Structure formats: C-alpha cells, structure tokens
Amino acid sequence: MPSTTTGTPGPRPTRRAVSAALGAGAVGTVLTACGGGASGSEPAPGSGKAQEGGDVVFLIDSLGDTWIPNNSAISSFQGNIWGHVTDKLVHVDGEGKVTPWLAESWEQNPDATEFTLHLKSGVTFSDGTALDAAAVVANLDYWARGQADKGVNPIGLFPKTYLAASAADASTVVVEFSAPTLGFIPTLGYHGSILVSPGTIALPAEGQADLSQFSGSGPFTVKSWKEGDNVVLTRRADYAWGPQALGRTGAAALDTITYKIVKESSLRTASLQSNQADVVFNATPQELDGLKDAGFTVATPRYLGFAHGYRLNASVAPFTDVRVRQAFQHAVDRDEILSTVYTSDWKKAESFIQSNVPEASDHSAEFAFDAARANALLDEAGWVEGPDGGRSKDGQPLAVTLFPNPYLVTSQAVDELVAQQLGEVGFTVDLQTFDVVTYGQRVTGNKTLSNYEVTRSFIDVGTVASILTSANEGEDWFGLGESDQTLNQLRDAVAGAVDADSRAASVDQLQQYVLEQGLFIPLEQIVQRIYAHRSDLVGVTYNGVAYANFHTAHLEA
C-alpha cells in the first residue's frame, strides 16, 4: 500500500477558475500569487459528502518529449495522462495482486505458452469503435513489435517470446509464445500496456504524436493541449467499465483534470499552498513535512520494480574488476542517505528489486556499508592511495562519473552524497547533470558508460530476466553479453519457469548472484512519484507502478 498522510486541515480558500483559465490559454495565471499559505473563510473539508463534478489542477515538472504512446511509455510524466485516457486488460495493485479489468477472465496452458483472454463486452474507444478482440490483437502486436517504419518502439518490458495473437471471436483472444511466459498476464497491467484505438495505431508517427487525434477507452478524454505547457482532460460521461477492484466502475466524479507544467518544485508547492493548484507532482522530501503540517495529503507510493541504485557496466573500467564493484557497494552508507535526503516514508533497499515485489527476498548483507572492507578490496585490486586520498593504478585515477536521473527528484542530492562517500575510500567522482531530453540522448542506452542510475518499474518479476543480458535482444544491463554462464542459467530459469514456486526460488538465486558479483549497487527503495494534494480531494488510488488514479476520486462538499 502507498504511504499516505493527511495533515490537520486548515480553512480552505474560495475556489477559483484556474482550470478554465488554463484551458482558455491564460497559462500564466497559476503562478501569479504564489508564496503565502492557504487562507480564507470556508469551513474545513472532511464532511464526507461526495461532490459530483469539480475541476482539478495538477502541476507537474514535465510532460516528456513525445506523445507517441509506445515511445512515451517509460516516462513518469506522460504516464499520468495515459492512466486516465486509456484502460488496461488487468489491474495490478501495489502489492502485485492481479485482478480482472477489460479481460474478465483468462486461462493458460500447462507450459504457459498459450493464453486465452475473455473480454468485457460493450466497451468502446472514444472514437466510437468497439474495444473487441480485433482491437486487442492490434494492441498486442503494437506493444510487442512497435512500428519500425514509423519510428515507433515496442514496449521495452513486453515479453520477447511473443509470437502472435488472434481473435477466436469478438470477445476472445488467443495469445501464443515461443517459450513459457508466466509473467504475461501481470504485464498486461504495466503502464506501457495501454489500450489504444486501432485508428490511432494506424496513424503516421506525426498523427500518433498529436493528442487531438488520440483515442483511448479511459474515463477521460483529451479536451485540449498545448505542447510543452498543458493538457486538459474532460470526463467521459458514458464510461462504465472501470476495474471492480477499485470500487468504481462508472463515470468519474470529477469534470476535468488540467495538467500544467511548472518546472520548479518550490513554485509547484507554493501554488498548492496558496490554493492555485489542487495536486502537485514531485515535491521534494524536504517539503513534505511542511505540506502535512499545513493540512495537505501526501502520498509516497512505492512501485513494483527495481530499487533505486546503479547498475555497473562490467565491460568498462574500472568496473571490469569485481573487487572494484564490490568496493563501490560497501562504500555506500545507505543510512546516511536515508537520514540526509529522505524522510521516514522511505525504506532501505534489501535487494536490487523492491520489497513489495512478491518474489523479493532480503539480501542486504551482500552490500552492507563497510568502509574498511571497501578499502581492503581496493588495496587487493592494486589501487594505491595517494597523499590526497585519491587512488590510482598504472598512472590512472580511480575515476567514476555519475549521471543523476532526472526522472527522480532526489537523484542529484543522492548522487552528491554518494560521491562524497566514494571519495572517502579513494574514488574520484564527477557528476554530470542533464534535463530529461538531454539525458535520454546522452545517457539512456549509452553502453560506453561505466554505470547507469536505475529508476525502473516492472509489473512482473519474470520480465527482469529479459533485460540483464543480451539474449533475445535484451538490454544487457551489466555489459556481460552472454559471457557469464551462471547469470545466463539463472536468467533462463526465471524466464522459463512454469509455476510460481520454482520461479520464486530462481529469483532468489538471481538476486544473490547479481549482488555477490557487485553488478548492482542498491541505494533505497524507490519512491519515484510523489504526490501532494488538497485534503478534501479523497478516493485517490495508486496502482502497481505508483501512478495516481483520479477516476476513483471526488471532492468533498
């Protein structure tokens, strides 16, 4: 469950027409009076009486660089939009529990190579076309293969064993895989697995990137948008197929949600405090206690996925030596990171995957802080300490560059602290900081770098195996290709499992091995998406990838 805290609410100021002003293009209005705390004479919220209607202004630090659905699927920013204008075949909660959504039921064959999905009837996209078996087949092909001729990517964590899908009838889809794919059903709840109208899929790339031409089946539709500035969503009155697990299947209570870009965290927070916004995204941890004290609701949901940390490239110096990788692990003081950068809402990493993943197990002893051990490992590896404390070998300094991940609001502060801690054992550390777009161009996927900071969700642990090495076009996280036979065997055991118990045992062994080899440096259990909102906005829920869902929310009268 997400960590959600509501402070003692104070008086709520008179509502304002910011949403309407933004929709009309008066985008500067939201920041004209930022600075003071909330004030006014209206009574405190909390009567418990649900209000039908209402407009919510949501301030966000970015909306990414493309609206092509597959190409934007990994963005923490666009995912807030996609979660409201589209649906999924299954719902997955923050503990990994899978429940029906537009797939009302499903079966699989004994070796998990064929799945049959039975679809809810009567569902339509906003363009009026039916969300039937043919539409689901089109989406499965789109997710698995992308559209290379249009520059549209496949979804990164969609099973690479996918062969084909076919419509047995209007409400039944049969999906085939080349090998056991136990994680297929949960992956249908991943934030990239959004159901898009076949008409949208058929558009050229520039059409897919145009939100005014987008059609999904979700509880909201796109009312208007301005590139690089705002997106306004409006309630779909005929929506009637929300997931039963969330307790609301019909139309949303809220009339509109306006997402407005405000890059500075302090300005977003001030806008919330001065009643010019209803929800803010990515407040810093240092701002959270003040928001709670002022009566706002703060949520820090953890997603299913990898812990925040660094994956090390074993093919790039200095991390070609396992002793240097292990020294990095033991040089990091995670207690200091938690106490300096974070609040009590954050948890220490226990492995390289989050502890809310059902198959996670505690391997924290493998990477415990131990500066003496880090120094001994570097001595053994031949890195000699100089008079300034920095180490060198064969005339080369023990140098590492860290690249703070712009998708995580705390990343730079954490990396600065890690740089100091590594310096204590002789590393020379540089930081290079980029915005989202430049980071994607220079850092993401760059196999020449010695390390990469991970902020990555997944729905099902079975997808982990497909990215660790280069097999089946895997991402080869550690630069090992197919050279590490133990890693290959564990990867295959996880990917090829046909029952949950054997897969969990293999996942435990995989965690142990990766950490023993110093291939991943866990830091803390990640909270990548931080939300703060007015306390009379109630009923907000969070899914397995920690996105807020306002379909279930309402304002209290």
Image: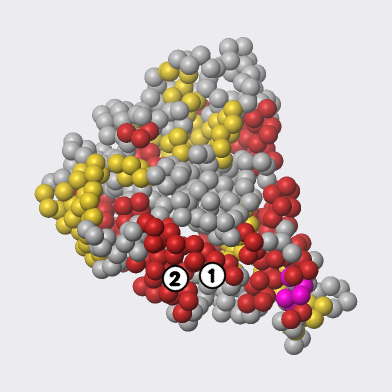
| Residue closer to the observer: 41 or 156 | 156
Which amino acid is tagged 1?
A: Tyr
Q: Position of residue 1 (x, y in %)?
A: 50, 39
Q: Position of residue 273 (x, y in %)?
A: 63, 28
Q: Quadrant of residue 319?
A: bottom right
Q: Position of residue 136 (x, y in %)?
A: 23, 50
| Vertical comparison of 254 with 139: above or below | above
Q: How is the image coloured?
A: secondary structure
Q: Position of residue 354 (x, y in %)?
A: 53, 53
Question: Is residue 60 left or right of 114 when viewed as pictured?
Answer: right
Q: Which mark is residue 284?
A: none
Q: Please give the name of the residue rendered at 59% of the width and 70% of the height, measured from the top-left corner.
A: 516
Mark 2, residues whose alpha carbon is within 10 Å: few (<14), some, or many (≥20)? many
Q: Which mark is residue 513?
A: 1
Question: Is residue 431 left or right of 478 when viewed as pictured?
Answer: right
Q: Provide the residue span drawn in magenta.
A: 374-378
Is 518 covered by the magenta stretch? no
Q: Secondary structure at mark 2?
A: helix
The answer to whether the residues at label 1 and label 2 have Cβ atoms under 8 Å apart is yes
Q: Secondary structure at mark 1?
A: helix
Give the Cα distance between marks 1 and 2: 9 Å
In the current view of this chain or complex, which residue is farthest to the left? 169
Residue annotated with mark 2: 490
Question: Is residue 174 left or right of 33 when viewed as pictured?
Answer: left
Is 375 covered by the magenta stretch? yes
| Residue closer to the observer: 116 or 41 | 116
Q: Please give the name of the residue rendered at 56% of the width and 34% of the height, measured from the top-left corner.
A: 4
Q: Please give the name of the residue rendered at 58% of the width and 67% of the height, measured from the top-left corner.
A: 515
